[in-house]
Amino acid sequence: MAEAFKFELVSPERLLVSEQVESVVIPGAEGEMTVMAHHAPVMTTIKPGVVTVKTSAGGEERYVVFGGFADIVPAGCTLLAESAVAVKDVDRADLARRIQEAKEDAADAKDDQARSKAEQFLSQLTTLEGAILPA
Amino acid sequence: MPSLKDLRNRIASVKATQKITKAMQMVAAAKLRRAQEAAEAARPYSERMGSVLANITQAIGGGGDAPALMTGTGKDDVHLLVVCTAERGLCGGFNSQIARLARDHIRKLLADGKQVKIICVGKKGFDILRRDYASLIIDRVDLREVKTLGFVNADAIAKKVIHLFNEGGFDICTLFYSQFKSVISQIPTAQQIIPAGVASAQAEVTDGGNAVYEYEPEPGEILSDLIPRNISVQVFRALLENAAGEMGAKMSAMDNATRNAGEMINKLSITYNRQRQAQITKELIEIISGAEAL
């Protein structure tokens, strides 16, 4: 059994998870990454996606996050999410609303850089929608 | 001298008022607990955010590619004040305290020949500041419809501020809110959020910042994402503290009101009883003197 480390998932409203876990899969801005104990210190931004937490008790929990940061040190991992919910509590309407907003942002974007950024965000959101919602 | 009937009416109306204030106090107490919980639940995030920010500022050495939100525009000609107050009154000096602090600040800035812009969050602050500085208020945010304060509300305000900053609308942004110390004491506070206090962030680094981080993507890029978020967090914290403070202030104000009403009822009851007694005595004297005359 892999060694456990401390994982914390924090959203601005509250502390969602704070427990000993075996591994965490984080949707990093430059690709997904699995964090285990004694990981080298990394700081990364995260994109909208699913965080999979494998607890040391053997359970697996999945959370949807919409952007944020992960602060990884050998002793633990802190995920600062802009907004986070457990996968089973995801509100379809809320997700649809976010996608709609992202679409509007992409349409209103003034310059190319802003537009590509908005479009990227939109595609991340739609991928996420596909991933968590059974078709 | 009011008649017995008048007195009875007075007592009844004060009693009704007392009931209302008592109910409001209890509602405020319940809401206060919830607001306090929310404020406490939000604390881990802002703390972590602080330490992450401190780490990263250290990494890029606070210079060079730090975004403008952090270093400022290098001028301090135009000041933006974000004044957060409550949406409702009946909470003692809560709103006027914040407004007074803001007003003193505005007066000082104007005396120094700076330009001032105001964004009002909350109706009460707007009402107070409108009297003197209506022309300076550029926007107001209405949170009356909001049942539970969410991060989205704060985020919307922060986005507005950042948008304005990017357009070159101001140089320095200060946030006014009331720090929740305890139920009976709320301290109106002014906090500069743009440019973010680099010095204070660096002070925190000393205690745990010796880890060498890898950054993904580049530190500068993370920072430019992090700073706006940090501003949202600051606004969010201010709103939550304000909500807790408002409820605390309301609770003690209503407690006072209930006590005052009680005192008033006591005084009125004494007057009422005395008059009733006087009237009985008078009637008795009339009857007796009538009987004696026969």
Image: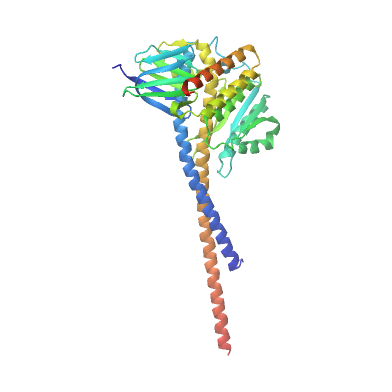
For the residue pair B278 and B5, the one nearer the viewer reads as B5
Kindly give the residue lying farthest to the left in the view shown. Answer: A1
Picture coordinates of residue B238, whole percent (x, y): 53, 31
Rendered residue at 43%/20% (across/down): A51
From this view, report whether residue B193 is shown above or below residue B220.
Answer: below
Q: Quadrant of residue B228?
A: top right
- What residue is drawn where x is 54% and y is 79%? B284
Q: Residue furthest right?
A: B135
- Toward the bottom, the furthest residue is B294
Q: Whole-percent x and y of residue B128?
A: 64, 38
Residue B61 shows in the view: no
Task: Say which quadrant the N terminus of chain B sits in.
Answer: bottom right
Dividing the picture into quadrants, the one containing residue A4 is: top left
Q: Depth check: give the residue in front, B24 or B202.
A: B24
Looking at the image, residue B40 lies above or below residue B65? below
Question: Quarter of the image containing the C terminus of chain B?
Answer: bottom right
